[in-house]
Image: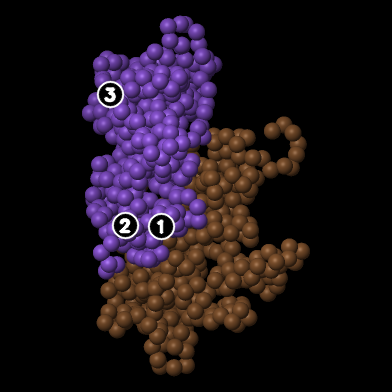
Chain colours: A purple, B brown
């Protein structure tokens, strides 16, 4: 465009190939194993003596995100992070991603560039190469599909299926914050719809909003395991809520689970916000999802190292399969059976 | 469901995890390198001493397919094939795929199972393992995103960028048939919309309809190269039309292109249908797309082998960059400059 305007550029103006060139021109490859990136029929990745790890996720407008309150740069960042989280959940290191986007015709090129800015920032932060993808038009909402590829030494890989009776159950960070952040966004969206002149009230909610809008994957936990010589017996990332993920581990490992409600790590902002909204913060942690923390089981021999580690909380232990999956309610000895959720979006 | 009915099952009845179990229960892993498939945070693929090749494609309802006339089983099959075609276009062998689907709420579980039947059939035909994916709901149309992962010896990999002056330009099979098939489907859809009692008239169109609805990837061409000891200098698959793909090869290789209109391989059904619809069959080949044939350049030393090979046609040769990208029109000596297309859906 030769005109000097700030008007958003409609997608049709530059065509598919022009668009791909514009979106991928800033990509710098970071991994020596990445032999060929965007621009051919496929990317090329050199093999080494280890396992390649592959994970894929799809985010749909109106289901996983609402463009009314999610800035596109954050959306791009989050789309990458949720995939990398799955790679870390195998105790692996992500190396490459591919990104496919179906673009709503309501979206301008500048908006799409914001989205890619977030994607590229996440690649930068996590040392990952964007090596391919597909950009297409959509007649309705925007859909983002990302595949992440990582690497792990064969003896260090952690599946969902290795938990053993008496193992400790641990989780990184804190839980329920992303869910609490979403409730605040939904509340302010409702206020805005009723009266467009109202400014949203986000004071004192910065942490839970960031957890919802710009979550991070727990690269630091994988690095901690490597440093301390710990290989968990099973692991999963918390995307659908603690309860659902515990049941996944129990099922895959053919064990039972016992956790303690008062051990579930909660941030003060999560607790305050839930009380303000008449929600139970423990339920936000159990069923809220989108925490992208790592939930893992580990041999009790590592107890001394783990108990004083601020990155982690020990929340329970593995039992035999017949005992089922239970939580000891706060301040009682009564057991509550854990329920699976999923598709909570 | 305990009731014995033939009613389609709404998706919400079995939930996300039930759905994933139901769709993935028949998967058998075919490649020894596939260490872990669906059911964990990520799939695991063992490395060997070669290059890993990764390709991804997204298909959007209303843009790439119309559920009014595309049977779901065919759609599933085609979604896989278009990805494998990109892997073959690197002279590589596909080994694994991941499949992510955003499912329109208009779709029943049985319909989704038909889609997966097609996906599984393609995996069977091409010896590929389905190792992961994501299933989510969509508020509007259905979106399918597939990532294919393959393998190739480092010395056999073929990029878009290796074409040299005087190389032969070849293409497998014939071109324009999928485009002609699409025109027939669109015509009959129009007739059906005007009068729902009308039966579609597809007589004598079986080949071009199959090319549109159930295309194949050219695994046989890669096997032919291996058998004959041929490594092309550059290669691409024909997804957007011959003209656009030739320009991609020319640009990546920094060369010019000269092809001959009367050498473009056309099936008699393509020619007849185009004439019936007042279309130029050559234009169907140049701009139609979705052929999934392999277009490649190869050293002239292989001319004797290639000229008598029924799988292939020699359609031109590589020139210097300054000569541009041109086609010699049939029965003349006049040059027509090739134009890029793309996003022709």
Kind of element beneath mark 1: strand
Provide the residue designation for mark 2: A23
Query: Which residue ends up furthest to the top in the rendered image?
Result: A332
Q: Quadrant of the N terminus of chain B?
A: top right
What residue sits 53% from the left and 82% below the top? B280
Q: Is residue A209 left or right of residue B138?
A: left
Q: Label 2, label 1: how many angstroms apart (C-alpha)?
A: 10 Å
Can residue A136 be spotted in the picture? yes
* Numbered marks: total: 3
Mark 2, other Cα within 10 Å: few <14 / some 14–19 / many ≥20: some
Q: Are marks 1 and 3 on the same chain?
A: yes
x and y, in percent, of residue A253 in the image: 47, 26
The mark found on residue A153 in the picture is none
Instruction: Write down the residue under mark 3.
Output: A311
Q: Residue at x 57, y 56 (%)?
A: B75
Is there one chain holding both mark 2 and mark 1?
Answer: yes
Disc 1 target residue: A135
Residue plotted at (59% across, 44% down): B105
Q: Read off the chain for label 1.
A: A
Q: Share a chain, discs 3 and 2?
A: yes
Whichever of callouts 1 and 3 sits on the residue coming sooner in the sequence is: 1
**Label 2 marks which chain's residue?**
A
């Amino acid at each position: 465009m030769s005109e000097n305007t700030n008007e958003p550029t409609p997608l049709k103006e530059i065509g598919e190939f022009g668009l791909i060139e514009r979106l991928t021109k800033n990509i710098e490859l970071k991994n020596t194993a990445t032999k060929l990136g965007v621009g051919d029929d496929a990317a090329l990745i050199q093999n080494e003596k280890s396992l390649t790890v592959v994970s894929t996720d799809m985010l749909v407008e109106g289901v996983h995100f609402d463009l009314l309150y999610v800035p596109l740069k954050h959306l791009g960042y989050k789309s990458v992070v949720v995939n990398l989280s799955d790679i870390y959940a195998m105790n692996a290191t992500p190396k490459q991603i591919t990104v496919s986007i179906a673009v709503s015709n309501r979206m301008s090129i500048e908006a799409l560039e914001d989205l890619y800015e977030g994607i590229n920032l996440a690649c930068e932060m996590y040392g990952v190469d964007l090596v391919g993808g597909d950009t297409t038009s959509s007649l309705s909402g925007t859909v983002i599909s990302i595949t992440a590829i990582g690497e792990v030494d064969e003896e260090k890989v952690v599946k969902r299926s290795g938990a053993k009776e008496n193992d400790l159950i641990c989780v990184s960070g804190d839980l329920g914050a992303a869910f609490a952040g979403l409730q605040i966004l939904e509340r302010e969206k409702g206020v805005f719809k009723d009266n467009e002149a109202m400014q949203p009230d986000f004071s004192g909610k910065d942490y839970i909003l960031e957890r919802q809008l710009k979550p991070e994957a727990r690269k630091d936990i994988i690095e901690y395991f490597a440093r301390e010589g710990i290989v968990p017996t099973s692991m999963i990332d918390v995307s659908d809520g603690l309860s659902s993920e515990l049941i996944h581990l129990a099922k895959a490992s053919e064990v039972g689970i016992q956790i303690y409600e008062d051990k579930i790590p909660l941030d003060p902002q999560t607790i305050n916000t839930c009380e303000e909204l008449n929600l139970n913060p423990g339920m936000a942690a159990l069923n809220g999802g989108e925490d992208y923390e790592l939930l893992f089981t580990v041999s009790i021999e590592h107890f001394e190292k783990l108990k004083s580690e601020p990155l982690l909380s020990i929340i329970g232990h593995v039992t035999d399969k017949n005992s089922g999956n239970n939580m000891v309610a706060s301040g009682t000895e009564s057991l509550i059976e854990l329920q699976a959720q999923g598709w909570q979006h």
